[in-house]
Amino acid sequence: MRRFVKRSDIGIIIGCIFVFLLFSIWNPQQWFNWGTISNVGQYTAILGLLAIGQTFVILVREIDLSVGSVYGVVGITFLGLESSNVSVLVSFIVAMLLALLIGLVNAVVVIHGKVPSMIVTLGGLFFYRGLIYVTTHGAVAGTPQPARENWLSQFFGGHWLGIENGFLLVLLLAFLSATALYQTRFGNHLFALGGDPASAESQGVPVNRIKASAFCLSSLFAGLSAIVTLANNPSTNVSLGTGMELQSIAAVVVGGTLLTGGRGTMLGTILGAFFLTAVRSEMIALGAPPSWYIAFVGIALLVIVTINTLLAKRLKAA
Amino acid sequence: MRTTDGAADSRQPLISIKNVSLSYGNFKALTDVSVDFFQGELVGLVGDNGAGKTTLIRIISGINPPTSGEVYFDGEKITKFHPKKAMDLGLECIQQSIGICDNLSVGRNYFLGREPVKRVLGLPFLDKKKIREASAKVVHDFGLRDTVDVDDEIALLSGGEKQTFKIARAVTFRNRVIIMDEPTNHLSVRERAHVNELAVQLKQQGLLVIYITHDIFQIHRIADRIVIMENGRKVTDVPRDAMSADALEGIIRDGGRAPSKGPKVA
């Protein structure tokens, strides 16, 4: 019990139960509506995938501000290849390789260039967005009909027993990521690096390799998130993914992962993504204009992090 | 082969430092240092802040390569300096503030960097049972509180318990060299005595113990040999019985230039 209360994601677990019950009682018709469930599931998947990748990076005391633009550039590459009659499978592989390459570039500049990740990935945020504008001249074609019907598009964008495949995918990947974090040497090294880099290195933890893996995972998850988005909703524009980097960081932090690294859970991250998505959906259902969402993210961030901090202090004193 | 001052020994040294220098830009942290360390020896490495003790240890433990000079381990020249390589050779450095991650459990810290795995469906997963059982045994054998649960975060241990834990970890992984960097700083009198006792026990088990400290009187009681450094140079290297603690303190106080009392050393 003591360990349960000390979990870093205790705040978001309570928060999710609270909003779930609140919406169930307050507005059951719209909350238990099939359209709402589908929308919330799909957007939780998109934000959740980005946030899983971001969690790896934040756990090692770094940050990835480029994921919104990576999401955009990988998605647009995927679409562009499909429109040029490249098969969906090849488009997918090339797009994911691009994501991996971007992650490697981030890692190399941070590790060997010794530039803070906030600067490196801020550069990435502008550069990859700019690349989208330059290469598309501002116009992006939708997915051609045959590609939409392709099995891979259906795998990422379809649904199964009424549940969005993207949502099932994010649950599966969150589970695999959590397993990697808690049940493998990689995970132990990642937490050690985030907790105390000098100590981790003194015990022979390959710190550079672990950090590089975190950046690559972040980019790969951002790319996958874009592909899930486009497989489900085939029309887009050049602003694809704008602002998503900050939403992903918000989901991670609301989920209880500390920006100072070394402490956090994948469950918290997924619940963080669900929490932000559920409240947004409900606010819209209650008639608030969609633009309120971003203001709400700010409030939720402040409230939940303050609660987490107070809880942590009280537990330390006890 | 050049022998160290005062410690002429026909045995092959376990670690041999030959004419090592290290510069950070224009700053010379070490200048032409030569010193040998032997198996089964407890050597006190003493000197003021900035004398070069820690720099020397950083070279020995593979964190920094020397700018010039050579390092031999068990007669073999070290060409690649990396902490992992030093660990593989059986060398562990116990530093005051480094070595354990407060956010990990006692068991996970114990196996950090050497985690045992078991294969499930061909994939390597942490062997949590082994982590728990092996670390619990060590915690018990080294006299830590019985209430310490190896699944608890290590942050719950006291300063002395953390030092004891680090020593226990270093010893049980069959290390040959234990370097203790100011291991008794910030410890209570009783904890200090316990750590010093452990250092002597390790030496008696045949390990080489290099003990870095400011406290010449404390180290003079337990060391076999004392090496004094000053301004990046080795200024004294004598068997413990050759000089009194007071005389050694005089050397440190005078900055290694003119030993005021005791026998003159090279």
Image (spheres, coloured by chain):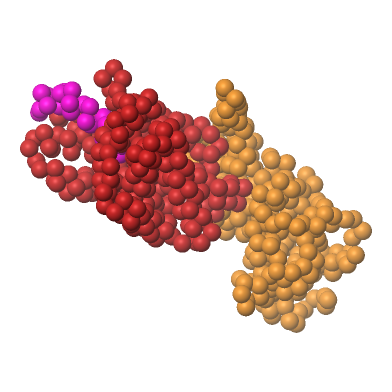
Specify whether A234 is left or right of A85.
left
Q: Which region of the structure is painted magenta?
A: A25-47
Q: Is residue A140 visible?
A: yes
Q: Colour of chain B?
A: orange
Q: Residue at x 37, y 57 (%)?
A: A127
Q: Chain A is drawn in which colour?
A: red
Q: Residue at x 26, y 52 (%)?
A: A138
Q: Which residue is drawn at 60% across and 51% down?
A: A202
A253 relative to B228, above or below: above
How far from the left and from the top, in percent, is residue A267? 36, 33
* Relative depth, front residue between B12 and A95: A95
Q: Residue at x 74, y 69 (%)?
A: B68
Residue at the outermost left position: A287
Q: Is residue A253 visible?
A: no
Specify whether B162 is left or right of A6.
right
Specify whether B10 is left or right of A270.
right
